[in-house]
Amino acid sequence: MEKKNEKLFKDDIEEKEKEKEIGIKSKIIESSTDLDFIKNRLINNDQNLKQKNINFNLLYRATRDGDNFNDFHSRVDNKNSTLTIIKTSLGLKFGVFLEIPFRQLGGNVKDDKSFVFSLDLKKIYNSNKKGQYNLNDINSSNGTLINLYYQPILITINCLSNNKSYTEKSDNANKSYSNFERDYELNNNQQYFTVEEMETFQIRLN
């Protein structure tokens, strides 16, 4: 128990040092380059952000808070401007920004400011406004934590211990987000993956 507490204390110190250095409390984001990539896309949503300090408030971390439905949604629901970052067991990193809050609905929610991103490819997939809306479908009956319309990203419950989370083929993913050139592009051309870590932040300004 003493060694475990020492490790937790050491991890906490290291995390605080990294937060001070690059500006985010994260086990996934490891460099200011990755963070600046995300910040620059957020500024594209709102040019006024150039004059603001963009803060990332950690709401949820899978390895800390759990990966069941209530573990996730009790911490993130009804909070606008959220950024979720996923790291797979193979080390791939990608995620989604949602302006409209997560909600436990049996339907779809339009969110034109949403975007998907790959940190590995340094690539943005914008909301598709050419007929297919970008929709966020969060439903407790389907066993998912995140289920984006046409599944450019789908994260299942118990995502840390199974390989059932997935991303879809490009022709489907492009119905809600533009710029997918290859099938399962976010996941290095493989459909299914296991989540090593997932974090959700609320974007705040000061």
Image: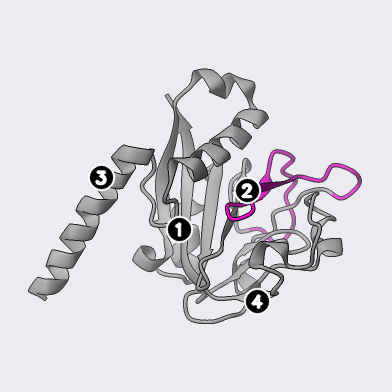
Residue 105 pos. (x, y %): 66, 58
Residue type marked 4: Tyr
Give the Cα separation between the discs numbered 3 and 1.
28 Å
State if disc 4 and disc 3 touch (CB < 8 Å): no
Numbered circle sitting on residue 74: 1
Name the residue carrying label 2: 122
Residue drawn at point x = 54 percent, y = 35 percent = 39
| Mark closest to the chain's N terminus, 2 or 1 | 1
Q: Nearer the viewer, mark 2 or mark 3?
A: 2
Looking at this view, is 130 or 178 the one in front? 178
Residue 160 pos. (x, y %): 47, 75
The secondary structure making up most of the magenta span is loop
Name the residue carrying label 3: 17
Question: In the image, 170: left or right of 94?
Answer: right
| Mark closest to the chain's N terminus, 3 or 1 | 3
| Mark closest to the chain's N terminus, 3 or 4 | 3
User: Would you say residue 135 sits in the magenta stretch?
Assistant: no
